[in-house]
Image: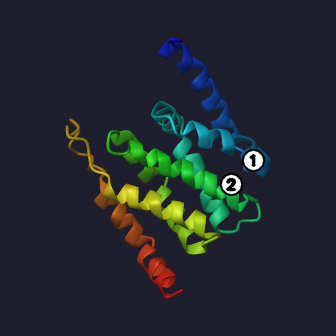
């Protein structure tokens, strides 16, 4: 059986993720169609999710989702691209229980707002489903078992995200969906 040295994979993976984040910095839909399929495949790997989050990925995904959710003319993301971007954000929520940095980044980059915007604009059922899955994952995340030494910063947990969801009007949108 072939043994792969873990370190030999990390450098090219980081290079690929750096290229993807550079493409996501552009608002052009052509760069989205170039990177979203690759990113979706990469996000099945926990190391890639952490690396992508550390490279500012959550912010780039959130921005593209916000632009797409508002039907923004500068962002011509297709429904499939919105689904893939949302899927990537959802997979990163799997890292929230083990990473205070990733939880804090979700708050800083206003990912909840982007996801709620997507639910409210309801481009397609599959997009709404994955957005709600990401929100549910965020709502259920807990803090690290070891509290940080800096007690002046409030620990980000599921209740932090729930407060954001309520503030963004998620309950109203869910009620509207139930009526449909």
Q: Which residue is mark 1?
A: 33
Q: Residue at x 39, y 61 (%)?
A: 136
Q: Which residue is mark 2?
A: 81
As displayed, is residue 101 above or below residue 108? above
Describe residue 97's horizontal placement relative to residue 172 as left or right.
left
Q: State the count of labels.
A: 2
Image x and y of residue 50, in percent? 46, 35
Task: Describe the element under mark 1 as helix, strand or loop.
Answer: helix
Foreground of the two, 73 or 179: 179
Residue farthest to the right? 30
Foreground of the two, 2 or 31: 2
Based on the displayed image, in which of its 4 quarters is residue 135 positioned?
bottom left
Q: Residue at x 50, y 84 (%)?
A: 176
- Locate the C terminus and report the quarter of the image it occupies: bottom right
Based on the displayed image, in which of its 4 quarters is residue 127 positioned?
bottom right
Give the colour scheme of this rendering: rainbow
Say few, some or many: other residues with alpha carbon within 10 Å of mark 1 (under 14 / 14 to 19 / 20 or more). some
Q: Residue at x 40, y 71 (%)?
A: 167
Image x and y of residue 68, in percent? 67, 62
Image x and y of residue 96, in percent? 37, 45
Residue farthest to the front? 1
Based on the displayed image, in which of its 4 quarters is residue 128 positioned?
bottom right
Q: CA distance from mark 1 to mark 2?
A: 7 Å
Image x and y of residue 38, in percent? 66, 38
Say few, some or many: other residues with alpha carbon within 10 Å of mark 2 (under 14 / 14 to 19 / 20 or more). many
Mark 1 near mark 2, Cβ–Cβ under 8 Å?
A: yes
Q: Earlier in the sequence, mark 1 or mark 2?
A: 1
Residue 154's disc number: none
Q: Residue at x 49, y 39 (%)?
A: 53
Task: Describe the element under mark 2 as helix, strand or loop.
Answer: helix
As displayed, is residue 160 above or below residue 25? below
């Amino acid at each position: 059986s072939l043994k792969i040295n873990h370190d030999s994979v990390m450098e090219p993976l980081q290079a690929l993720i750096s290229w993807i984040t550079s493409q996501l910095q552009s608002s052009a839909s052509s760069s989205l169609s170039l990177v979203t399929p690759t990113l979706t495949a990469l996000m099945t790997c926990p190391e890639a999710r952490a690396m992508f989050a550390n490279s500012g990925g959550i912010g780039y995904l959130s921005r593209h989702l916000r632009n797409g959710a508002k039907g923004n003319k500068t962002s011509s993301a297709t429904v499939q691209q919105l689904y893939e971007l949302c899927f990537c954000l959802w997979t990163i929520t799997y890292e929230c229980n083990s990473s205070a940095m990733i939880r804090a980044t979700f708050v800083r980059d206003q990912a909840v707002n982007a996801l709620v915007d997507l639910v409210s604009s309801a481009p397609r059922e599959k997009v709404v489903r994955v957005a709600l899955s990401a929100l549910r994952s965020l709502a259920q995340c807990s803090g690290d078992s070891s509290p940080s030494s800096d007690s002046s910063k409030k620990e980000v947990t599921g209740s932090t995200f729930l407060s954001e969801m309520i503030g963004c009007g998620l309950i109203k949108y869910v009620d509207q969906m139930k009526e449909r």
